[in-house]
Structure formats: structure tokens, C-alpha cells
Amino acid sequence: MIKKWWHDKVAYQIYPKSFYDSNGDGIGDIPGIISKLDYLRDLGVDILWLSPCYRSPLADQGYDISDYYSIDPRFGTMADMERLIAEAKKRDMYILMDLVVNHCSDEHEWFRKACEDPDGKYGRFFYLRDKKEGELPTNWRSYFGGTVWEDLPGTDKQYLHVFHKKQPDLNWENPELREEVYKNINWWLDKGLGGFRIDAIINIKKALPFRSYPTDRDDGLCSIDAMLEEASGIGAFLSELRDRTFKKYDAFSVGEVFHEKPGELPDFIGDNGYFSSMFDFNEAIFGHSEKGWYDASPITPDDYKNCCFAAQEKTGKIGFLSNIIENHDGPRGVSRYIPESDCCDRSKKMLAALNFMLRGIPFIYQGQELGMENLPFSSIDEVDDISSRDEYQVALHAGLSEAEALRAVAAHSRDNARTPMQWSGQANAGFTDGTPWLKVNPNYTSINAAAQIGDEDSVYAFYKKLIALRKNPVYRETVVYGTLEPIWRERHNLMAYYRKGERTLLVVGNFQKDTQEITLPAPYKKVLLNNDKNIVEHDETITLQGYQVLILEM
Ligand code: TEU
Ligand code: CA
């Protein structure tokens, strides 16, 4: 395997709107991020991925871009962005922007020109079809609900949007469109970006010619997945993308790849893969139902373990996955993977260690290092996210009561992760002097950065230790490049694995509140990390306390 500059890094996702507001308008911004760079450097993270902050109507919180060459005034100016890149560089940190090129905003100039002249150059930037009364071109359901077809204003055509109607899909079959995308990426890389996180990328390849698929709900529509499964040939687009952009700059690229086809992993993240890395979503999508969030099944500790190990096994030494417990598209990891009654500092640290020590690039989502939790929603009116609002309707339509529908949405809502970052115990969690754009989680009085930074036993301090361990010259090779071998795999509520490289490490977590015993295959040399003060041991037998996690050098 060719060694790369980003293999040993730790990444951190910033959701700009909710990170830190520097000017009191209730919206986080780039100057706010700059003012927190020392906090991030201190934590030990190297790569910062910013969710989109380009000019946008924010119909999908910036994942609807109306100008790829400018910063939305709510987030700051281009000069702020340049300053962020420079200030990050001073601290040996890299900035990744979000590359959202499956679609743009319906307020983008390209789309406006397509409306003016659908048969002209910009009409070919989109997927347009002639409108037929009482009939849609296909029966595909948008990820955010309803049909994917919308009338193209002022014309007799309709356009395709697999996400929101304010996010028209870009036509990747058109080389002129692809040139525009590459030009933009290189323009940003020339500014000194470290690379990109690539949004919703599997969607760029459509199965042509368009056709309908069997319906899977009583709305008469079918999931986009049916079409994506049939689409082939994305590799030609992605290798061209890589060669024309990232590769020339040795940039880091991490793909948001759902459902790649069996056997395709080396093409995606092998030595000359389309991307440097891609996220492991195995745990995040576990239990999802075609019917909607309301029908999802819960995930148990054993499921979590099996999902992680399956992803690790599939990947082996092919490349590096990017490991997450959460991102801006779902609930908080501690709320998803730990039973509510057991969710505490100790179990949060266990989950952190089990995830962080997997082979791959660890990504921390803002506030994860503090153990931020889901928001207790009391009404659907508190929900901002378009996807959650749709899922609420889906649940009601399926016959759930309003209270049940709210509960289903609350468990999965993307707003859980989007509440403002909890900086301190002061008003609005110290996020803003104004009115925050989204409700602050009321638990900020106990869960916040200011309270945790000086506390050696805090979740924050534990993350810092995990990061330091990964960077410790004695263990770095093992943590970064070592193989992963599960151990005691069949044990209930126990997740344990070796990392084997120059050294041998054993990571073991007791994923329950009751104690359980393990007998080590050999005596350990050293305890590298423990979320408890003690280890209860007798010869080679250790009694793990509830949610205790250990990282041992063997
Ligand atoms: O998400 C892509 C995606 O495929 C969805 O599964 C998303 O996770 C789902 O809608 C959650 O309900 C990306 C972004 O991460 C997301 O924030 C954007 O809304 C989406 O693309 C469109 O750009
Ligand atoms: Ca602001």
C-alpha cells in the first residue's frame, strides 16, 4: 500500500451554521470557526471538513448551492474563507469543503438559464423531459418525499430532482457540465484546500433510458435505490473526476458512498481509487426500512459490533474507511447506540474508544467530543429539517398518532445533530449572543466545552487521549496501519478486537451495564486507556465493569 499524508490524521466535521456565531445573528459563521481553531488544534484534530458554506438559499441547509464560487453572506466572505485556510495551515491543519455536485440550487444561474432556454446549452446541464398531462416521466420517489419531477417554470418541461425540488439534478452525462465542475474544484484547490468531502456521489450516475420500477409504497412511487441499482458505469465519471482534480493536487477526498456494488471497493478506495476514503455507513443505516423512519428497527450492541466488523472485513487492507458515530444527517451516536437509561460519560467514552480504534480515518462530528445527545423534541414545530418534516407526514399517513409520529421522527431527525454546539453553560450554550436559528439542547448546562476542558475525567479529555494515542510515535504505526482482528466475537454485549502491527493492542468494551468477565489469552504489558479508575483483575481474568472499555498493549 502506498503511504499517504492523510493516513494518520484525525478529521473533524464542522456544521458551520451551528458551530459558533461571531456576530449575533443566530447563525454560525466562518469568523466563528476561525476563533475556535485553537480549541480544535488543542483537541488534536488535523483535518476539518466544513459542511457547505457556499452561496445558497439554504433550502437544504447549504446542500443547495446557487454559486460555487462564493461564500454565503450569512457565513461570511471569501476573504474569511481564505483567512480560515491560512489560519488552519499555520496550525498544520487542512480544510475540506463539501462538494455538492449531484445537484445545484434552482436559484443557480445555470438553472435560471435552463428555464429561459430549455433547448439551449444550460437545458442540457439538467435532466429535462417533456411534460405530459396526467403522467410523470418516471415513478421515482425523492429522498425527501413526493415525486422527483417538477415543472420547469415557464416551459412545457419537467426537471428531475432526487432530493428537494430546490435541488435540480445535474446531468453528468454532459461533458460541458463536467468541465464546469472540474474547473470549480481546481479553483478551490488552488486556494489551498486540503480536499473535499463528496456529497451524495452515487446519485450522479442514472440508469438510462429512464424507466419506472415496481412501486414500494401506496403512494404509487418507488425508491431511487431501484434505479441506482440498475445504473452502471459510474467509474468512468469518477476516475475522470479524480484525474482532472484531486490527483493533481494530492488532495484528500472522502466520498459519501452508499451502496457501492459488490466487488467495487478497490475501485473506490484502493491504491488508485476514485477517492482517498469513504465513510462507513454500515452502522448508520442498520435497521432502516423502505417504509420510512417510523418502521426502522433499533440497533443492539451486538448489531453495532457486527456492522463495524463486517465493514472492516470487507475493507481489509484494500484502503481506509472513514469511521463515524454520527454526522449532520442523523441522531447523535450516543443516543443511537446506547440505551437512553445507560447514556452517561462512561458509556460515551466506551463507544468513542470502540469506534476510534477501528482501522481507518476517525471523523469526529462537532460536539461528539463533548458527548452531545439527541434533542428532546416536544412538538413537530420545533423541527426545521425538510427530511424530518416529510418523515413525520409519512408516519401519520401510515396511521401513527401524532405523538407516535413525533417519537419516530425524534429518534432519527437530522436536527438532533444540528443543534448549536454547546460551548459553555451561559445563555444559548455560548453559541450566540442573539437568537439561535435552531433550538439549543437544554442539557447544555451540564454538557458543554467550558465545563469539560479542565476536567481530566470528561468525555472531551477522553477524546483527547484517544487522539494522542493515535499520534504517539510508539503506537502510531499499529493504530494507523495495523490489521484488525475481532476476538470473542460471539460474546453477547462485548466488542473486542486486536490491532496488530509493530505492536499488539487489545481493545475491549463491555457494552452493557452489568459486569462481565474476560480471560486474556496472555498477560497484558500496559494499560493504554481505561474509562474507569481501576481494573478488577485476578490472574488473567478481568471483571469489566458496566460500559468499561480498555485499550491494552499485549
Ligand atoms: O446526504 C445524502 C443522502 O443520501 C441522504 O441519505 C441523507 O442522509 C438523508 O436524506 C437523510 O435523511 C447528503 C447530505 O449529507 C445531506 O445533508 C443532504 O441533504 C443531501 O446529500 C443532499 O445534498
Ligand atoms: Ca453569524
Image (spheres, rainbow, N blue to C red):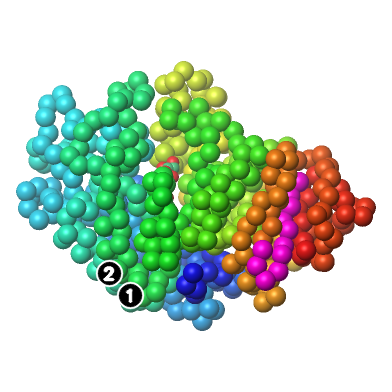
Judge left or right: residue 140 versus residue 53.
left
Along the line of sight, which residue is nearer the eye, 426 or 269? 269
Q: Which residue appears at 50% of the width and 41% of the height?
A: 285
Judge left or right: residue 229 versus residue 457.
left
Indicate yes or no: mark 1 CB to ligand 1 under 8 Å.
no
The mark total stands at 2
| Residue farthest front in this picture | 521
Q: Which percent across, then down, holds residue 30?
A: 45, 66
Q: Which residue appears at 43% of the width and 62% of the height?
A: 270
Magenta span includes 276 = no
Query: Which of the image's four quarters has the C terminus?
Result: bottom right
**What residue is shown with label 2?**
244
Q: What element carries label 2?
A: helix
Q: Which percent across, then down, holds residue 321?
A: 51, 57
Q: Which residue appears at 48% of the width and 54% of the height?
A: 279
| Residue farthest right in this picture | 538
Judge left or right: residue 477 versus residue 186.
right
Q: Which residue appears at 43% of the width and 35% of the height?
A: 389
Residue 142 versus residue 316 in the image, above or below: above
Q: Which percent across, then down, holds residue 48?
A: 50, 66
Picture quadrant of residue 421: bottom right
What type of secondary structure mainly makes up the magenta span? Answer: strand
The answer to whether residue 440 of the structure is visible from this angle is no
The answer to whether residue 67 of the structure is visible from this angle is yes
**What residue is shown with label 1?**
248
| Residue segment shown in magenta | 500-511
Are dots 2 and 1 in contact, CB under 8 Å? yes
Question: Which amino acid lies under the numbered mark 2 shown in the image of this protein?
Answer: Arg
Spatial CA span between label 2 and label 1:
7 Å
